[in-house]
Structures are given as structure tokens and as C-alpha cells.
Image (cartoon, helix red, strand yellow):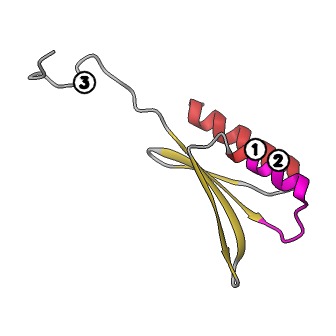
Amino acid sequence: MSASGETAAALAARLSAVGLRPRVEEHTRFTTVEAEVPDTLSADSWREVLDAVADADRFGLVATSLNGRTLWAVVRKTVPTTRDVGGPGYQR
């Protein structure tokens, strides 16, 4: 598992421990974690949720009257580097 995958899995585990049901999805350049947030989430649980998503590269909360509240977090995958990053014509 990649470092971003491990970070996303740890984030999902922490959200599960608070009682949320996270969904993890792998993409080409990043991994996302989403979870529906109930209106009844306690202040202590919110603190744990915010502490968990602080490890993500980006996070947010989408709240609508139709769909409730969805927490999302993005963990970027690292881009592998090569010896010839600048290409054959790159001057050092």
C-alpha cells in the first residue's frame, strides 16, 4: 500500500472509531475519504473528526438541505521522481 493509501486508511479508521462510515476511493493522483455526518455528532466527536482530517492534504464539509452533511478529505499521492526529471535537454 502506498503512503497516501496508508494515510487514507488510517483516516478512515479514525472516522470509523467515531461512529462514521467512511468510503475510501483510489484515484490516479490522490485518494479520497468521504463520510456522511449525522446531526447528532457530539462536540467531542467533532474534535476527533477534525483532528483526523488534519492529516489530509485537503478537507471540507458539504452541507445541503437535501443530502445532509458529507465530510471529505483528499490525500495526494506522491509523484515518483526519476534521474532525468528535466528531460534529455535539461541543463544543470
Lateral position of residue 10 relative to residue 30, left or right: right
Q: Position of residue 38 (x, y in %)?
A: 83, 68
Q: Is residue 37 above or below residue 11?
A: below
Say what secondary structure mark 3 lies in: loop
Crowding at mark 3 (Cα within 10 Å: few <14, some 14-19, many 20+): few
Image quarter of the C terminus? top left
Disc 1 and disc 3 in contact, CB within 8 angstroms: no
Q: How many numbered callouts?
A: 3
Q: Position of residue 58 (x, y in %)?
A: 56, 49
Q: Residue at x 65, y 33 (%)?
A: 6
Which amino acid type is marked by label 1?
A: Asp
Mark in the foreground, 3 or 2? 2
Mark number displayed over residue 48: 2
* Residue 8 falls inside the magenta stretch: no
Image quarter of the N terminus? top right
Give the magenta part as a residue range. Answer: 37-50
Disc 1 and disc 2 in contact, CB within 8 angstroms: yes
Q: Is residue 52 above or below residue 64?
A: above
Lateral position of residue 66 relative to residue 39, left or right: left
Measure the alpha-carbon separation of dots 1 and 3.
36 Å
Q: Residue furthest bottom?
A: 66
Measure the alpha-carbon separation of dots 1 and 2.
5 Å
Mark number displayed over residue 82: none
Which is more toward the observer, 6 or 53?
53
Mark number displayed over residue 51: 1
Q: Residue at x 74, y 44 (%)?
A: 52
Q: Residue at x 65, y 39 (%)?
A: 55
Q: Which residue is mark 3?
A: 85
